[in-house]
Image: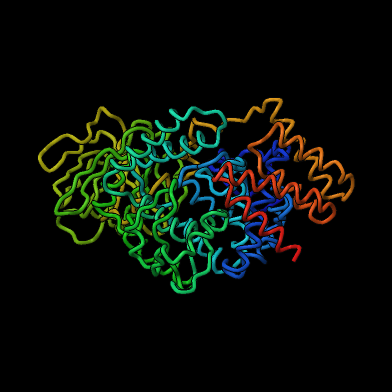
Amino acid sequence: MNTFNNPQVERLPAYLRQYVVDQCYDRYTWTDQAVWRYVMRQNYSYLKHVAYYPYIRGLQQAGLSIECIPDLQTINDHLGKIGWGAVTVDGFIPPSAFMEYQQHKVLVIAADIRQLKHIEYTPAPDIIHESAGHAPIIVEPEYNSYLSYFGSIGTKAMFSARDFELYEAIRRLSILKETPGVAEAEILEAEEQLQFISDTMGEPSEMALLSRLHWWTVEYGLIGSPENPKIYGAGLLSSIGESSTCMNPAVPKLWYTPEAVHYPYDITRPQPQLFVTPDFRNLTDVLEQFADTMAFRTGGEAGLKKAVDCKNVSTARYSSGLEVSGVFTGYEAARGRPAFIRTTGPSALSYEGKELEGHSRSYHTHGFSSPVGLLKETRKPLEDFSPADLLSRGWERNRSCRLDFESGVSLHGVLQAALFRNGKLLLLTFTECTVQGPEGETLFLPGWGTYDMAVGEAIVSVFNGAADKSAWEETQHVSPKKTERIKYDAKTLKLHDIYSRIREIRESGEHTGQLKDLLALLKRAYPDDWLAPLEILEIASRVLPGLAEEAARYLALLKENNTEYTKLITDGLRVINSEQA
């Protein structure tokens, strides 16, 4: 992986680097460069009036040029000055990974660029959305602090197994829509699958709810007042269609409050309403209110239920500080409080985010289980027992002892070790151990091996992923569905050459006489292309008025015959005319 001489990128853990791909700058065609230039010229012309004021200044500060697709190294050089970095990825990545990149202050940029037919908006992430949308506003200090803090909260969010299915369905549809030559039937089938999954999600997970807050702020946020809002959301800043339509009074503008979490969104359609924050501080205040309801802050039985529903690696933290990571498959509760927890498959024990020596998933290969709660006949939590307290009860190495919990869980075994950290008892290790539940049910038998019992009065936190992700190594889900590389036919490659020649003429100011032949070729061989004739008109309007009139007539004909081009051509002409006024 290229590191781009950026400290933030250099510090990325290995499990996040698996999503990084090379930008492969040479893969961008001259048509791609023209798409970038058109969108950026539109954005600069329009957004300077409706974007939150740091945006235009931020374009330059983020290393972005109107004229060409940015090189990732250039972006890293500029973002590095404000303590951020950037990497390129292949389309959508899982929300949990995306959040963690934000926490590490690394901007995730999709390496691909939208096709000309999706120039106004694409459901797939692309370099226009990620760099031209996100990067410029990141230079605002209060906003980039919010982004990083949001990432730190998002990495803890619990998700459901259905969230993974939804992610894969969204990713598949976005790839299909940006792949030339895909049958409409295949796209329709993918849309129907996405709709079915969306309609049958059930109760939204923490991640699903948090994603709504992210959508209504980071992607589609407005700032100011409902009567006079300015755009700061990257989805709007990078969409030359929605950035204008969103300002229509017919689109409701609501104050951004915790109620925004109850508004789902659809990435394939214009948004039915938008939310306005009075300032960036309010974004953090709303996030804090939601975070107070999340399992990583509340723990308890409700948190364990989320872990079981997740069906993926999660972590439960005991009040002692011991962290149990694995796939939770069950728990027992007594009087509304966790009494016993259980994981299946590789599990690991950690403390303060660092895996405990000898307690990796290669040791706990078949799972982990342990009581939770107070012992009978004492109000002192076991985690607060000192070595002397253990000896006073006759609990010493190689001696048999019995522990009876208020929940009814009981343990009988030969004590082998006690593990302390910072004055807290974390773990008791037994051999010849039997653990029974309140009804006498078997929870552990001597023949199963050594028993490591976690210590803690309560489960105080439950969160997504392993406590020590670097030690766990493979905690992240990587989609098997990859973006397909476009293979261009000879005719399309010739069109790329035409765009290249137009750019050379525009930048050099020489050989303008060749434009007439290029326009004739476009009329004859590429009657569906409107952007190249528009670029020819832009140059000709300065030096070849006769050719400019011919190009204008041709563009008018294209608008008449193809209504989907009307707004695109009209907006392009508006920018050209405004520059020459």
Horizontal arrangement in the rendering, residue 97 relative to residue 303 (left or right): right
Residue placed farthest to the right in the image?
Answer: 510
What colour-coding does the image apply?
Answer: rainbow
Task: Please identify the quadrant where the N terminus is shown.
Answer: top right
In this view, 195 is above or below 150? above
Query: Who is closer to the viewer here, 66 or 206?
Result: 66
Name the image quarter holding residue 210.
bottom left
Residue 452 place in picture, x, y as percent: 32, 40
Residue 284 place in picture, x, y as percent: 45, 67
Which residue is pictured at 42% across the width and 62% down the height?
Answer: 274
Numbered-mark total: 0
| Residue 387 can be seen, yes or no | no
Query: Who is closer to the viewer here, 41 or 53?
Result: 41
Which residue is pictured at 65% across the width and 61% down the height?
Answer: 44
Which residue is pictured at 17% across the width and 43% down the height?
Answer: 410
| Residue 461 can be seen, yes or no | yes
Residue placed farthest to the top in the image?
Answer: 490
Name the image quarter holding residue 526.
top right
Horizontal arrangement in the rendering, residue 4 relative to residue 404 (left or right): right
Query: Who is closer to the viewer here, 261 or 549?
Result: 549
Residue 329 place in picture, x, y as percent: 27, 38
Task: Please identify the quadrant where the C terminus is shown.
Answer: bottom right
Residue 166 place in picture, x, y as percent: 38, 40
